[in-house]
Amino acid sequence: ELVETGGGLVQAGGSLNLSCVGSGDAFTTYSMAWFHQAPGKEREFVGVISWMGGSVSYADSVKGRFTISRDNAKSTVYLQMTRMKPEDTAVYYCAASTVDGMNQRAAYDYWGQGTQVTVSS
């Protein structure tokens, strides 16, 4: 099970930090990703971190503004969002995959319930 927390309302240019806690002993064997889904749009890839945290990649739209990290001792993956824009408004989901570095939704086996992030202009 994956549970996201930290969503909320933030002004454009502001920052917000999301967390995703995984249950079970296998957390360290999964590559962890963040996706977001805006109203009326497809769920889109935000970024992914490898199972040991040594490799991270991002969608072009968030590169340089968002940072993904993980703490395997706490079974937690983080998404730090800075210089936020109204177009970042979406429900944010974390997801787990046994395959490293994937940006396709179909590669992910487990999903959280999502947390709403709203950026006001």
Image (cartoon, rainbow, N blue to C red):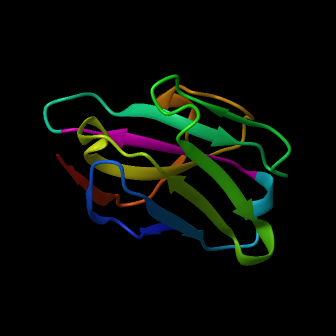
Image point 69% across, 55% down: which residue? 69
Q: Is residue 29 above or below residue 39?
A: below
Whether residue 51 appears in this view of the structure is yes
As drawn, the residue found furthest toward the left would be 40
Nearer the observer, 32 or 69: 69
Q: Is residue 84 left or right of residue 97?
A: left
Nearer the observer, 12 or 89: 12
Nearer the observer, 34 or 62: 62
Q: Is residue 19 above or below residue 93?
A: below
- Percent x, y for residue 33? 58, 44
Say whether residue 77 is magenta.
no
- Percent x, y for residue 72? 78, 67
Q: Is residue 99 above or below residue 74?
A: above
Whether residue 1 appears in this view of the structure is no
- Percent x, y for residue 66? 54, 44
Say whether residue 34 is magenta.
yes
Image point 21% across, 29% down: which residue? 41
Q: Is residue 80 left or right of residue 43?
A: right
- Percent x, y for residue 49? 70, 44
Question: What stretch of residues is rendered in magenta?
Answer: 30-38
Q: Is residue 107 above or below residue 78?
A: above
Secondary structure that dominates the magenta span: strand
